Amino acid sequence: MVKGKAAPQRYTAETLSFRAGVPLRTVRFYVQEKLIDPPLGRGPGAHFTHHHLVQLQQARTLQNAGFTLEVIRERRGELSLGLQAMATFETQRLRWSEPPSKRQGSDDDEALDPAECIRIPMANGVELMVSQDRPLPSPRQLVEIAFQIRKVFDRR
């Protein structure tokens, strides 16, 4: 037996859809719309790889984030930066959902104590918390921030 890289995983369309958690119709539609690469091979030997799975997950994530199919298709190679940004955001969101005592980070990244913050309502169920030692944005900036937050949260 030769040591080294393992053979790439091969998926049927059905297995790919199961692994990605999407209907088989979605896989076929994404291939048809050129949102993911076509399968390798033809006929009964046609198969997908881990690369296809990543493409499918990225396209689905971006579609759920509000990107149009046209944008996903046109900028497929460039979208990895956006996905990295979304992953970073998700990591930070999870981190901030932990109690302050369990958070890890640099000394510059101190947790806010809600009792010591200025709390500014932005939308129904959304507040902006600003440390008392930080200057507040101007009233105009606060209105713009609230407008953007309401635009995002009212879509849900």
Image (tube, rainbow, N blue to C red):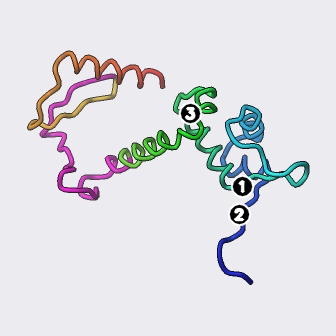
Do the residues under discs 2 and 1 have CB atoms within 8 angstroms? yes
Q: Earlier in the sequence, mark 2 or mark 1?
A: 2
Q: Residue at x 58, y 28 (%)?
A: 71
Instruction: Please state the horizontal and vertical placement of residue 101, each as a whole percent of the image.
Output: 24, 57
Local crowd at mark 2 within 10 Å, few (<14), some, or many (≥20)? few
Left/right of residue 44 with respect to residue 4 in the rendered view: right
Along the line of sight, the residue nearer the viewer: 42 or 154? 42
Q: Earlier in the sequence, mark 2 or mark 3?
A: 2
Identify the mark at residue 49; answer none if there is no mark.
Answer: 1
Q: Secondary structure at mark 3?
A: helix
Instruction: Please state the horizontal and vertical placement of residue 111, each as a whole percent of the image.
Output: 21, 48
* Res 142 quadrant in image: top left
Q: Secondary structure at mark 1?
A: loop
Left/right of residue 62 with respect to residue 154 in the rendered view: right
Q: Residue at x 53, y 39 (%)?
A: 79
Instruction: Report how far apart the C-alphas of labels 2 and 1 lie in the structure.
Output: 7 Å
Q: Quadrant of the N terminus?
A: bottom right
The residue that mark 2 highlights is 8
Tell me the kind of residue under disc 3. Asn
Tell me the kind of residue under disc 2. Pro
The residue that mark 3 highlights is 64
Q: Residue at x 72, y 43 (%)?
A: 37
Q: Is residue 113 magenta?
A: yes
Q: Secondary structure at mark 2?
A: loop
Left/right of residue 2 with respect to residue 68 in the rendered view: right
Tell me the kind of residue under disc 1. Thr
